[in-house]
Image: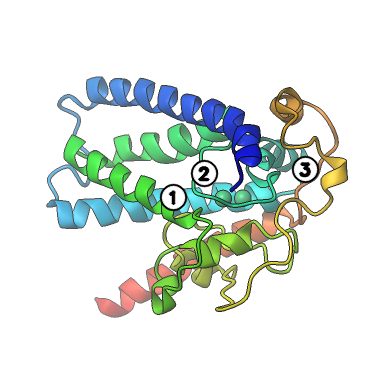
Amino acid sequence: MTWRSFFRDLKYIVAGGASFAAIDGLFGLASIRLNAGHVGPITTWPMHLSVPAALLVVEFLNYWQHRWSHELSGNFGSFLWKSHAAHHLPEQVYVLMHPASHPINGFIVRALVTLLPLYYLGASPETVLLFSTVITFQALISHGNVDIHTGWVNYLFVGTELHRFHHSSNLAESKNYAVTLSFLDIIFGTFCYRPGSLPKRLGVVDPRAYPKSNEFWKVMKLPFEGEFQPRTKLAGLKHRSEILNFFRNLHEIFRLDE
Ligand SMILES: [Zn+2]
Ligand SMILES: [Zn+2]
């Protein structure tokens, strides 16, 4: 990170951070009111079970919204990608970049796939607090511009070694859609781990087609204009069958256990 790139991305950090904070605050308050007396499946679980359960559910949803933001075709896919692209425009990955995102993307990630499921699961305030601490800390670690080698831990959690490849401009290696739990990428076949090697270039495939990451208002208007298609185009149908297969396999595993 240089001072120049820091000031260039500061606007996104503020826009992303402010919208995340506003959405968190709003939904946090709403969920405190709604949760008063609200009981869900995990409300009475001890913390050592409720936190991993919440993490698994939220991560599963987040994995798919993130993957769809990159791979879904059609108007909806294009809209998702254009609101996520702000996070991929900078050509550096560093510790403050995680909140560098479009407010629409912030809303999808924080409200739709995090706070809403936590509410329906009936997560207690303590569970939400510990859950939030874990994902915030992990998000900071995964965007660190430092060389940390964590070996086998990469098969469980996303760190810098994996997330750097997600920011690669090379589509063959820009996988790793999971935000916290990397084994979701292993399960769904999007895991890219190359110990000791680094992506050649970070950012989008064709930077000239996009606004520059310092053109703040153009980036903010991006979701509402242009013909930008996701980086790879996979039909929604393929995703549906992958998810169905996943649940079929899960069902098989639990049936065998009975
Ligand atoms: Zn992404
Ligand atoms: Zn990232």
Colour scheme of the picture: rainbow
Does label 2 or label 1 sit earlier along the sequence?
2
Q: Is residue 102 visible?
A: no
Residue closest to the eye, 93 or 3: 3
Residue closest to the eye, 184 or 245: 184
Q: Is mark 3 within 8 Å of ligand 1?
A: no
Residue for point 51% across, 38% down: 99
The image position of residue 68, as x and y in percent, is 63, 49
Q: Are circles 2 and 3 on residues that touch, CB within 8 Å?
A: no
The image position of residue 110, as x and y in percent, is 45, 35
Does label 1 or label 3 sit earlier along the sequence?
3
Other-residue count near label 1 (Cα within 10 Å), few / some / many at <14 / 14–19 / ≥20: many
Residue for point 57% across, 37% down: 100
Residue closest to the eye, 220 or 150: 150
Q: Are circles 2 and 1 on residues that touch, CB within 8 Å?
A: yes
Q: Are circles 1 and 3 on residues that touch, CB within 8 Å?
A: no
Give residue 48's quadrant in the image: bottom left
Q: Is mark 2 within 8 Å of ligand 2?
A: yes
**Mark closer to the observer (2, 3):** 2
The image position of residue 189, as x and y in percent, is 58, 71
> Number of labelled discs?
3
Label disc, if present, on residue 14 of the rendered structure: none
Residue bearing mark 2: 98
In the image, 240: left or right of 59? right
Residue bearing mark 1: 139
Q: Is residue 5 visible?
A: yes
Label disc, if present, on residue 74 of the rendered structure: 3
Element class at badge 3: helix
Give amino acid for label 2.
His
